Amino acid sequence: MARKIKEYGFFSYAVNEALHLSDKEEEMITRILQNIETEYLQPIDVFSQQVILSQIETLLIYADRFYHRQFITRKHMSHDLLQWLEQLLFDYINSDRLTKLGPPTVQFVSGMPQISPNYLSDLLRSHTGQSIQQHIQEKIGEKAKEQLSTTNLTVNEIAYNPGFSYPQSFSKLFKSKTQLSPQAFRAEFRKGPTI
């Protein structure tokens, strides 16, 4: 159970990221808590621990389900948060902060409107299938593609812009995302479409 609990990201959500339950969902949670209390107050037997643990596991599964549902049903709030994230990343990546400070960190992104990293990551993953880190890397990759296709900056200059310590790290990440090296991407782009 201790290992399984670590899989539930909602334990590190902030208070303002509380789970919103319908009346029916609240009744379900209350019944599970009552079952745990009832079992706890019974005389102990060989099944006591197993019954309590299974009820706690059921409670955690429902909480996880309701949080995932919340990301979908509270679309207005989720949409606003995702729009804010996109604007934050756009502003950061298109400013001199990227060159001076390197890529934005998960803590930077989630710390701005007092959002816990796990909540933001779970929300983003439910809408895009990506973690925050993957999303940041994708945005940096888009910026690199833009620079490769619209400037004469060398690959090394472009690599240092997003704060990579080594151009090889940039090239490796770029190739993992595009299946092309930065040089090959630039050559393909400049060659243009074939008719």
Image (cartoon, rainbow, N blue to C red):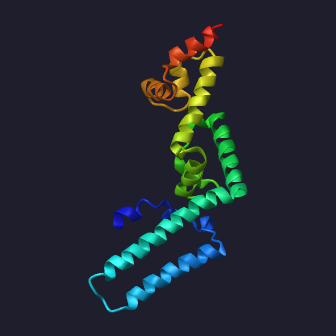
- What is the x, y in percent for residue 144? 58, 26
> Residue drawn 62% across and 57% down?
71
Q: Is residue 102 something that shows in the picture?
A: no
- What is the x, y in percent for residue 96? 63, 34
To which quarter of the image does residue 15 belong? Answer: bottom right
Q: Is residue 77 something that shows in the picture?
A: yes
> Residue drawn 47% across and 29% down?
173
As drawn, the residue found furthest toward the left would be 46
Q: Is residue 122 left or right of residue 22?
A: left
Q: Quadrant of the N terminus?
A: bottom left
**Closer to the camera in the image, 42 or 10:** 42
> Residue drawn 65% across and 76% down?
23
- What is the x, y in percent for residue 52? 38, 79
Q: Is residue 111 left or right of residue 12?
A: right
Q: Is residue 55 left or right of residue 25?
A: left
Q: Quadrant of the C terminus?
A: top right
Q: Is residue 145 above or below residue 139?
A: above
